[in-house]
Amino acid sequence: MIGFYNISKKYNNQVIVHNLNFNIKSGEFFVLIGPSGSGKTTILNMINRLVEPTNGRICIDLKDNKDYDLKKLRYSIGYVLQSYELFPNMNIAQNTGIKLRYSGMGLKSRKIKVKHLLDEVGLYYEKYANKMPSQLSGGEQQRVAIARALSTGNSIVLMDEPFSALDPISRNKMQELILKLHKKYKITIVFVTHDMNEAVKLGDRIAIVYNGNLQQVNTAEVIINNPKNKFVSSFFENYY
Amino acid sequence: MESIKNFLVNQHHEIILAIKEHIIMSITAIVIATFISIFLACLLINHKKVSQIILNLFGVVQTIPSLAILGILIPIVGIGSKPSIIALVVYAIMPVFQNAYTGLNNIDPKLLVSAKSLGLSETFQLFHIKLPLAYKDILAGIRVSTVMTVGAATLASFVGGGGLGTFIMSGIQTNNNSEIIVGATISALLTLLFSFLINLISKISHKMVILTSISVLLIVSSLTLYNNFSSKKTITIAGKMGSEPEIIINMYKQLIQNSNNIDVVLKPNFGGTSFLYNALRNHSIDIYPEFTGTVIKDVLKTNENIPKNPLSYYLKSKNELKKRYDLVYLKPMKYQNRYCLAINKQDASFYNIKTISDLKNSSLTAGFDPDFMKEYTSNKGLRKTYNLKFRKVVSMDAGLKYKALNKKEISITDAYTTDSQLRSKNVLVLKDDKNFFPPYQGAPLVRNDFYNKNYKIVKSLKVLQNKITNKDMIRMNYLVNTKHQKASDVARKYLLRKKLIRN
């Protein structure tokens, strides 16, 4: 479980995030949605401390995330960005297995594990292992990024608009893939998007963020039927 | 062309040795500079201001003339390849550092976030992500440094570091163009070769490059170590610029090795008086030949009026050197290499001039070396002593004055009494009838501690006492300067002829 308690973030006296209080349950697919500049990426990055809050605290499994060793915290949380996250100097197998290598896993067992991971995201090891990231399509690259995020058997994966740069067909495939993996591994996913269709399709619960304030947190059904305020209802007008 | 060919054939051993020295020196400097630069760049990766300061600092260092840097280094680290390598490293750092720093800072910030989010240690990120990504930039910097270093390594010869600069410098000294051309061409070719090799390297993966550079490093260091360890007891003999000191130190070497089982390292064309004298005192070298006149004038800088005869000069030098600096000055050879005035022979017979005093009423044109000008015009100078009046006195480069004398553009010039040009039938040396020019006799100068510990070596050097006449020396200078014979061969032939060594 990830708990946000009175979380605020100011940057140069400008409020980015204001007094957040909510919980993300273990194994939940939790979507943060809002227009650009609403503060949703900041919220996401505070979980693995890429951004530190000005006030409040965040607990992971009832322990303040500041009490974890920073590197171990980040190591144990998967993270997938929108793009440009594979290292161009390493091939696909190396990119996938980088965390395993860091943890000291031997070459042989690493190969078996990487093969399995690539298999899980639908990439054929023999075909892809020795390719460089630049030889892959955007969708394939995101598959590798997901495989890497899953490599250490993480229970939490953070995703920052991972599919928004993809064409609709690949995006659809990737959404199916992540739903399948979520179900199979019972991982907690915190997923940032600005696409309402995506949020409704993926999220067990959706949090709507606007101007650094949490507008409403609930299942898609409840939000659509009972929007809490005008912003929420206008935000969902485009959904059909 | 012919003389270049001769030079290549006669000196090929020396050339190969110089190329080896040049390569080892350059590679050592580049490797050290690369490690320092990359280390600094990694250290300062998040400190923009400090790195700017460092960059400016190296920029300033870059503007200091290399000779000045070498001069500063000599009292600290001595002479030879050490100061040269340090100076080369100092120059080579900036391009590598600048490129490495730029490369490390130009990595896409999104990639850095990605790297950070994985929870990897800084060191792991550095070695597996950042440095490999900056690799192309670093290599570009290394290439710039390499081209610079291989060229600049020619300067090492100024401090006895050897390398291809030796030929350039001795070529300038002895007016031997083929020597200069050979030295400069080979160094240019080496630069091209190195640049080409780095280009080749940049096409293979960085892992291969690291492997290759480590193996190159091992080879170079084992070579240097081998050279250092395989030697028996070694003594180092240095000489000043020019053919004469080179011939003399070759004689020293052959005499020593004739009766001692010892390695003698020669450092010909090693530099000026104060340089050699300091090198001797700080144990960088063990022996060098020095002139009595130079000791009095440039080392002791005494104002005393010493009678201008060779024996007084020698005894004064010997006693003062021992008293002041604990140096032992062995007995001199016969010949004198002092200043004299030379005259075109036709003018001499036409005006009936045999001595410098005879010049008084001649109204001839004189051409003097800029250094000699001082001797001529100063307060107690030649002009006052002999009350000379020339029609015209021009200042001209040492390399040109004999040509001008032969073409009768000038009638009188200054000369050294062992100049090989004095062999010419057109030139006559005027008698210094008022004994103006001080005596210059050469003798080995050694430290007292060396003298006491190496009785046999000193004994073999004593063989040259009162040997070698001016005529001998002029002839030997001629063979080396004009006929481009090797100084070691010329020295050997003399020693054999005089039965000073066994065959």
Image: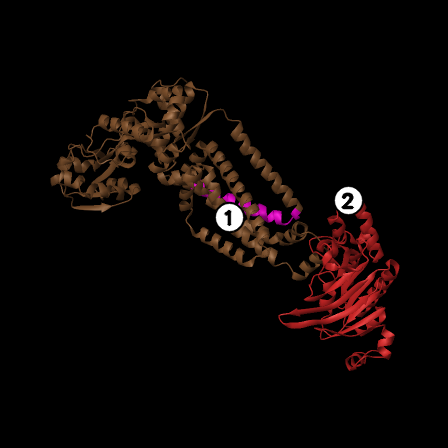
Chain colours: A red, B brown
- Residue B388 picture location, percent across and down: 14, 41
Q: Quadrant of residue A19?
A: bottom right
Q: Amino acid at mark 1?
A: Ala
| Chain label for disc 2 | A
Q: Which mark is residue A106?
A: 2
Mark 1 lies on a secondary structure that is helix
Q: Is residue A134 magenta?
A: no
What is the magenta segment's predominant secondary structure?
helix
Q: Nearer the viewer, mark 2 or mark 1?
A: 2
Residue of label 1: B92
Where is residue A8 drawn, in percent x and y? 70, 69
Where residue B327 sits in the image (x, y, percent)? 34, 28
Query: Start and end of the magenta stretch?
Result: B181-206
* Helix, strand or loop status at disc 2: loop
Image location (x, y in percent) of residue A104: 75, 46
Residue placed most toward the observer, A220 or B345: A220
Image quadrant in which the N terminus of chain B is located: top left
Q: Nearer the viewer, residue B432 or A66?
A: A66
**Tags 2 and 1 both on a single chain:** no
Pick out the residue farthest to the left.
B361
The quadrant in which residue A107 appears is: top right
Decide if residue B186 is in sight here.
Answer: no
